[in-house]
Image (spheres, grey):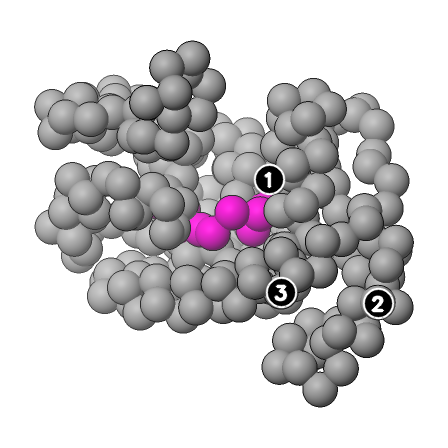
Amino acid sequence: MIFFYERSGSSWLTDMLNNHPEISCFPEVFSLNWNNENKEKRGQPKYTTDAQIKEQLHKIYEKPKTKARGFKFKYPVQYNHYPYVVDFLNENKDDLRIIFLYRKNKLKGAISSQNNVRLRSLNQKSNLIGKDKGLPPLELNIRKAIEYTQRRERSDFNFFKWAKQFTHLHVMAYEDLLENTASNISDVCDFLKVSSAYRPTSKVRKSTPDSIQQAITNYDELCEQLRCHPLEKYLD
């Protein structure tokens, strides 16, 4: 299971793993329902009964023929809305292999989150795929970015404490995966006990430049607001 906070490179990692012949990694099976025309169901779990959730888990772990089988599970949203899945994970903490995927730079995660809103408004997708046109620099909503970054710091800390209970835990930073993709994917393959003789490929592309100064139009204003602030450490 890939356990992650949004905008951590989980789609990119999943795509690379699914191109491995011995791995089957389902996407966010236990997502929330945002596209339903019924307003009362928006933001609610897609599966609402234990029987429905059990059926999805069966499809993930029993039906595929691949050696390593799993799915993505997002914190805190999916964790909080699917207690039955959390119970399943806790009951199998000695057998399941958990990949804890996080970002070292939480502020860049905030910028990526605001870029995600732009992407969805343009093409209803959360990531750039293949030959998709890149995004121009973003005018960052600084107040929201600061709140998001602080919230993300707290979530990473709290949910990592939960993840540490699993016997088989592989911790991976998005920045490390970006810097040395082949080596990090090889480590994941070893962790999942599949062949590491695999050259990772993916159609998913970065939507946000790695440099904050290049990613946003109001970098100077951001620097001024973060002067002597605990989040100043995340600036370029």
Residue 66 visible in the current orientation = no
Question: Residue 236: x and y, percent?
Answer: 80, 71
Does 26 appear above or below 233?
Answer: above
| Residue density around tag 1, few if under 14, some if 14–19, many if 20 or more, within 10 Å | some
Q: Quadrant of residue 66?
A: top left
Task: Please give the label number shown on residue 12.
Answer: 1
Q: Is residue 132 left or right of residue 180?
A: right
- Looking at this view, name the residue that lies furthest to the bottom: 228
Q: Helix, strand or loop at disc 1?
A: helix
The segment highlighted magenta reads 1-9
The residue to which callout 3 is attached is 146
The residue to which callout 2 is attached is 221
Question: Residue 81: x and y, percent?
Answer: 27, 41
Q: Helix, strand or loop at disc 2?
A: helix
Question: Residue 141: x and y, percent?
Answer: 72, 53
Q: Is residue 175 left or right of residue 10?
A: right
